[in-house]
Amino acid sequence: MSPKKEVLVLKDLLGSNKKIAGEIRAHLEEKGILTLNLLSSPGAGKTTLLEKLIEHLHPTYRIGVIEGDIETTRDAERIRAKGVSAWQITTGGACHLEAKMVGNLFSQIPADLDFLFIENVGNLVCPASYDLGEHLRLVLLSSPEGDDKPKKYPKAFTTADALVITKIDLIPHLPFDPQRAAQEARELNPELKIFTVSSVTGEGIQELSSFLIEKLKELRTIHA
Ligand SMILES: Nc1nc2c(ncn2[C@@H]2O[C@H](COP(=O)(O)OP(=O)(O)OP(=O)(O)O)[C@@H](O)[C@H]2O)c(=O)[nH]1
Ligand SMILES: [Mg+2]
């Protein structure tokens, strides 16, 4: 295929993804379910952060989790062990989730959820191009990855609503400057909300939980 045709095919794919994502978002808004898409490189701490958020939010809030991975149901099993429903999507090789994969699960997802978390495939590049119908996109950057990453992988940061700097308990052992990471990310996206958390010590989890609860209230006020 010529490069020009390849670009056109990609545009078509993204166009139809966008349409499905819009339908998913409208459905979720009607039900009052705040939906979050979590993006990061592999191992940045997405599932561990979800486990911690569940400890804070469940059972006061009803939570469901969609887990995206290339292979295995390990992350869904971790979430179920916390007493929360989880649906695993295994992409069999694809490096990102697409809206139609989320849409296919809809008949299984209870209509009375408060929060639907979608953990994307561990990858800081491809998932950034695919709207899944979420209301908020969280990008995680863990301290061992380095504070220079936002400008090297800009789309994940320009399309996100919030940056969550994870594994801050490790900062004393690393040449990682959270201020530098935050500044780079804000230069790309001045609107970005920034949180710093450790899923080991629990630092910052309360602040992030409160932000999510606030956003749930906003969603329900707007779509009452
Ligand atoms: N020190 C420290 N380790 C953490 C923290 N959060 C997660 N980890 C560890 O980092 C590793 C990866 O965490 P996961 O939560 O599985 O990462 P993930 O982003 O879900 O990984 P994938 O789903 O494979 O992309 C595990 O060994 C976690 O125990 C943290 O806040 N501090
Ligand atoms: Mg995971």
Image: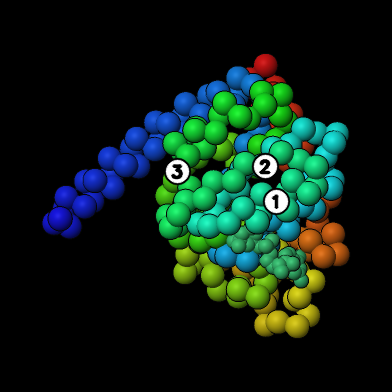
Can you give x and y, in whole percent of width and height, for residue 113 in the image? 71, 29
**Which residue is labeled 1 in the image?**
77
Residue occupied by mark 2: 86
Q: Nearer the viewer, residue 1 or 73?
A: 73
- Assign a secondary structure to mark 1: helix
What amino acid does circle 3 point to? Glu
Whole-number angstrom distance, CA of label 2 to CA of label 1: 8 Å
Amino acid under disc 2: Ala
Please state the horizontal and vertical placement of residue 156, each as a whole percent of the image.
50, 56
In percent of the image, x 86 and y 64: which residue is there?
Answer: 201
The vertical placement of 222 against 96, above or below, is above
Q: Which residue occupies the foreground of this view, 217 or 192?
A: 217
Q: Earlier in the sequence, mark 3 or mark 2?
A: 2
Q: Residue at x 45, y 54 (%)?
A: 92
Looking at the rendering, which quadrant does residue 30 occupy?
A: top right
* Residue 224 appears in the figure: yes
Instruction: Specify which label sits upstream in the sequence, 1 or 3.
Output: 1
Q: Quadrant of ligand 2?
A: bottom right
- Identify the element where label 3 is drawn: loop
Q: Is residue 213 left or right of residue 33?
A: right
